[in-house]
């Protein structure tokens, strides 16, 4: 069996991660033409690659299940427009987030110069980290394109407008993303109305 031909057939960018591609390249470099009766009788490189592929797919599915919400935000604020931002993180921070060890309670966003940061987003210490541990409540830079940053910067200058963090999740590619909302604080009447509507929905669901 020509392993190079097999490697080419499984090189699907939507499925194969860089790590699996590295495995393929190792096979190609060590076994340019692999025969079943060759160095390792009965050994099938495609089986090893299939196991690696399934492992990567399962890891991607597990990562995408992480979803941390700021449930209080919808009660305190009226959402105007939403954005999804990348986050500048350290190695131990992304590992903690993938384990679901984070919280958005009391978090909000602010501008420092032309850069947007999230404050009070708690990311717990990574237990296995031996060095370079992070500050759990440090301010973290958010990544948006320039037009989005300018739009938000203009909006928050208006009275009563702010930016709140509503949802932290892991994308299909394994990156941490933060959903933020341009929002306006609710008045007491609006909060009471929201509670009333919530109670009515609960009562209807119980009937």
Image (cartoon, rainbow, N blue to C red):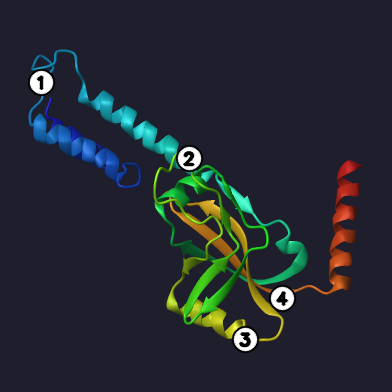
Residue occupying the point 10% across, 20% down: 35
CB-based contact (under 8 Å), mark 1 and mark 4: no
For label 4, the crowd category at 10 Å Cα-Cα, with few meaning under 14, some 14 to 19 and many 20 or more, is: some
User: Of the residues tagged 1 and 4, which is closer to the observer?
Assistant: 4
Distance Cα–Cα, label 4 vs label 2:
35 Å
Callout 3: helix, strand or loop? loop
| Residue ID for mark 3 | 157
Image position, residue 62 (x, y; %): 49, 39
43 displayed left or right of 171: left
User: Of the residues tagged 3 and 2, which is closer to the observer?
Assistant: 3
The label number, if any, that marks residue 35 in the structure image: 1
- Specify which label sits upstream in the sequence, 1 or 2: 1
Question: Who is closer to the viewer here, 14 or 154?
Answer: 154
- Specify which label sits upstream in the sequence, 1 or 4: 1
| Residue ID for mark 2 | 61
Question: Who is closer to the viewer here, 69 or 33?
Answer: 69
Question: Who is closer to the viewer here, 116 or 65?
Answer: 116
Residue occupying the point 46% across, 70% down: 144
The label number, if any, that marks residue 114 in the structure image: none
For label 3, the crowd category at 10 Å Cα-Cα, with few meaning under 14, some 14 to 19 and many 20 or more, is: few
């Amino acid at each position: 069996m020509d392993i190079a031909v097999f490697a080419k057939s499984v090189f699907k960018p939507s499925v194969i991660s860089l790590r699996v591609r590295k495995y393929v390249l190792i096979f190609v470099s060590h076994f340019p033409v692999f025969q079943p009766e060759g160095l390792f009788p009965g050994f099938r490189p495609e089986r090893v690659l299939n196991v690696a592929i399934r492992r990567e797919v399962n890891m991607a599915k597990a990562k995408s299940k992480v979803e941390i919400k700021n449930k209080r935000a919808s009660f305190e604020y009226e959402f105007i427009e939403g954005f999804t931002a990348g986050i500048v993180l350290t190695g131990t921070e992304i590992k903690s987030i993938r384990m679901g060890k984070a919280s958005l309670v009391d978090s909000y966003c602010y501008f420092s110069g032309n850069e947007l940061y999230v404050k009070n987003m708690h990311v717990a210490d990574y237990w296995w980290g031996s060095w370079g541990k992070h500050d759990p409540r440090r301010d973290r830079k958010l990544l948006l394109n320039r037009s989005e940053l300018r739009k938000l910067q203009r909006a928050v200058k208006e009275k009563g407008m702010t930016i709140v963090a509503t949802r932290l999740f892991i994308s299909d590619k394994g990156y941490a993303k933060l959903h933020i909302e341009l929002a306006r604080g609710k008045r007491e009447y609006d909060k009471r109305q929201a509670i009333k509507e919530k109670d009515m929905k609960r009562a209807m669901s119980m009937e």
